[in-house]
Amino acid sequence: MQEGVFKASGHLEGFSDWLVDCPGCKKRFRIDKLDKKGESEYQCPECKEIINTQKNKPRQFNLMLKTNMSATEDEPYYAYLRPETAQGIFVNFINVLNTTNKKLPLGIAQIGKAFRNEVTTGSFVFRMKEFEQMEIEYFVNPADAASYYESWVRERFDFYINKIGLRKENLRLRKHEKDELAHYAKACTDIEFMFPFPAKDGSASGGCWSELEGIANRGDFDLSEHARVSKKDLMYFDSEKKEKFTPYVIEPSAGVDRTFFAVLSDAYHEEEVQGKTRVVLKIKPELAPYRVAVLPLLKNRPELVELAKNIFYDIKKRIPAIYNDTGAIGKLYRRQDEVGTPFCVTVDVDSLGDGCVTVRERDSMRQERVAKEKVFDFIEKGN
Ligand code: GAP
């Protein structure tokens, strides 16, 4: 988006990290991520040298990625890759309002790429320069903002448990202190997940509470600033109360990549089964790549393969399914356990006679004979 948008939003001025260089290993770190060891003293996480911020002065580093949209170098026209999807929504707010004739509260949601020039990327997909955000800007009457903020925090916390299936003990809420609030925020609560990073003391076990999503009360900061810079009226007229005001915005802002990471980490289990380790992804059926796998017990019996394929084609019309005959049955089960397939359907020689198949459930490994016509209903009920 063009520079003016980010001038108005405050990102040109305020969207930056304080970085400091370690005098020992010369690496650069975010000061807010270092362990404080004393007045103006921090410990380098790499070489353990003490970094004294009186001698090694921290410097501000803007996180936005800048590009030149102009055809010529001497007349530059600067634009920036968006650091959050939110700003597109703010500059379109009045178009959406006028074309839909909606009343407040009005929510506009967007999913898409965001870009930040992060210094310390890594920890799998936790922090990247290019990532995927899903944001809702929820426009409300300022008088209702505090209660909508509270209800969005609850709503979003419940979402991760009930809709995504994360374990409650791996989730917590953390309110931002006044001095850590983003430049636009009046209040913010993070939903944190126990990510499987090494703990702060360096031990590999234990994990680390880190942000999965933030819910902010952005007040009228963005609309007011865009109105001021663009000289456009971005106010809302409440025709019932006959009052005109700039809406406040409650913003649930989530990362797709971090959600994906949390789901994998939460669902990953290793179990002992008959002296061997079974890896199983206990993922919610709705999130599993396949809801069911159809497996013929013997692949050198054409009539058995044909029956298995017919069952597979029939189920595939309704739910994501996979057919696999590339190994012995034990191995095929393990592969499906690893990708979290909730049910396996095995077609054996008896199936040719009695028309029944074996349905195996992922978590309990319980097996049941089911008539082939009833397989779909059985699976749906089990979910
Ligand atoms: N509009 C508000 C906003 O962007 P944020 O806390 O900076 O707030 C929201 O980002 C979410 O985006 C985070 O909770 C996280 O899930 C995700 N996110 C932010 N920076 C990220 C990065 N560098 N890599 C992956 N995900 C990131």
Image (cartoon, rainbow, N blue to C red):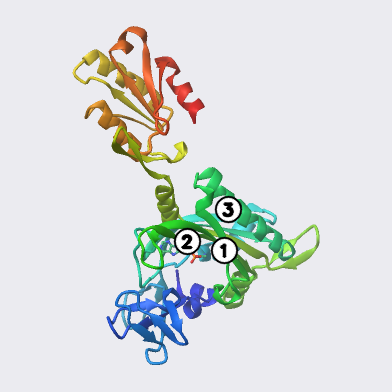
Nearer-N-terminus badge (2/3): 3
Tell me the crowding category of disc 3: few under 14, some 14 to 19, or many 20 or more residues within 10 angstroms, Cα based. Answer: some
Q: Mark 2: which secondary structure?
A: strand
Nearer-N-terminus badge (1/3): 3
Q: Mark 1: which secondary structure?
A: strand
Q: Look at the image and tell me in which quarter the N terminus lies.
A: bottom left
- Where residue 374 sits: x, y (%)? 45, 17
- Which disc, if any, is residue 174? 1
The answer to whether residue 367 of the structure is visible from this angle is yes
Residue under label 2 = 209
In percent of the image, x 74 and y 64: which residue is there?
143
**Most foreground residue, 50 or 75:** 50
Tell me the crowding category of disc 2: few under 14, some 14 to 19, or many 20 or more residues within 10 angstroms, Cα based. Answer: some
Judged by depth in the image, the label closer to the viewer, 1 or 3, is: 1
Residue contact at pointers 1 and 2, CB within 8 angstroms: yes
Judged by depth in the image, the label closer to the viewer, 2 or 3, is: 2
Nearer-N-terminus badge (1/2): 1
Residue under label 3 = 156
**Most foreground residue, 21 or 64:** 21
Q: Is the shortest distance between ligand 1 and the CB of mark 2 under 8 Å?
A: no
- Mark 3 is on which residue type? Arg
Give the CA separation, mark 2 to mark 3. Answer: 17 Å
